[in-house]
Amino acid sequence: MITPTIQPILCLDGVSKQFGGLNALTDVSFSLNEGEVVGLIGPNGAGKTTLVNVVTGNLRRSSGRILFKSEDVGLQKPYQAARRGLARTFQIVQPFPAMTVLENVTAGALFGAGAGSLGDARDMAMQSLEFVGLDGLADRPAANLALAARKRLELAKSLAMNPKVLMLDEVNAGLNSSEIDGALALIRRIAERGVTVLIIEHLMKVVLSLSKRLLVLHYGQLIADGPSAEIVADERVIEAYLGAKFAARLKELNHG
Ligand SMILES: Nc1ncnc2c1ncn2[C@@H]1O[C@H](COP(=O)(O)OP(=O)(O)OP(=O)(O)O)[C@@H](O)[C@H]1O
């Protein structure tokens, strides 16, 4: 039997980003394989959003290489990233308030890969809205949506871009537990479609239920990259982010 080889789809090779004298990312290297769901964790200010921003061209990396399917995309603009299939959600969700839900997602489809015409883009947008369960609100102004629906709209927008890699920046922040369960189910369904997912998330329960692999940033440095079970037991990660209380609770759960 021939075992299919898993290809890296996105590689960061020694990527750094400075803001004046501040090192937001220092020499960060890792690869994401096609179809993987990987969690990116770290304390506030660790550089997680900056990492997404340099991958999607919203910020220019200071040095290092960013490879998408082996092509160096380190100098790309956000629309080029979207066309390649590198999509992301924003931590602070800001839909175009005067536009309807459908129009917002159609704008996403036009920005991304695959929509040849406005009609195509509307079809892709409608499919994305159905996928996230917002099709019933398609004609509502986006300004009227509550937070959980705005987060779904943000997801629908990035899905309408037909992504190969989807970077989710705190899509669960501010949601209640049943809304989080709904979001988790959606993210699983997105991953089942073969989309590679990088999920930035502060809720460890959520991260651990989605990803078998974790990346940990601390002061802009990647201090750990490996199987989730090993990472949460790593002393440096406990010290930098998880805290001793979390580690003890996890130990209890694993032994109880
Ligand atoms: N545009 C910017 N100009 C200057 N400094 C910035 C800019 N964006 C981020 N920073 C700084 O870079 C560092 C990393 O910020 P970043 O937002 O990437 O962290 P984060 O891990 O996403 O944090 P959080 O979990 O709070 O969202 C922080 O010190 C932040 O203040």
Image: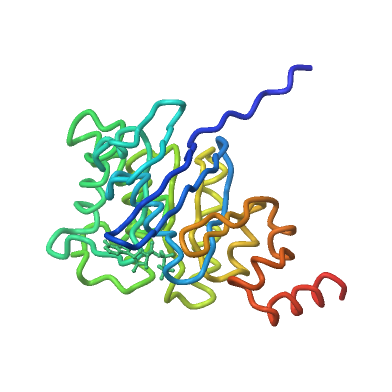
Number of numbered discs visible in the structure rendering = 0
* Residue occupying the point 50% across, 33% down: 9
Residue positioned most to the front:
21
Quarter of the view holding residue 161: top left
* Residue farthest to the left, as pictured: 98
Asked whether, in this view, residue 66 is left or right of residue 218, the answer is left
14 above or below 230? Answer: above
Residue sitting farthest toward the top: 1
Q: Residue at x 28, y 50 (%)?
A: 59
Q: Quadrant of ligand 1?
A: bottom left
Quadrant (top left/top right/bottom left/bottom right) for the N terminus: top right
Q: In which quarter of the image is residue 55?
A: top left
Give 25 or 129, whichever is nearer the viewer.
25
Q: Is residue 247 left or right of residue 41?
A: right
On screen, residue 17 above or below 64: below
Measured as percent of width and height from the top left, residue 116 is found at: 23, 28
Residue 11's place in the image compared with 150, above or below, is above
User: Residue placed at 69% from the left, 64% from the top?
Assistant: 232
Q: Where does the image place residue 208, in percent across and percent down from the top left?
A: 64, 62
For the residue pair 194 and 54, the one nearer the viewer reads as: 54
- Residue found farthest to the bottom: 245
Q: Position of residue 151 (x, y in %)?
A: 36, 64
**Figure colour scheme:** rainbow
**The C terminus: image quadrant:** bottom right
Q: Residue at x 30, y 31 (%)?
A: 114
The x and y percentages for residue 15 are: 43, 44
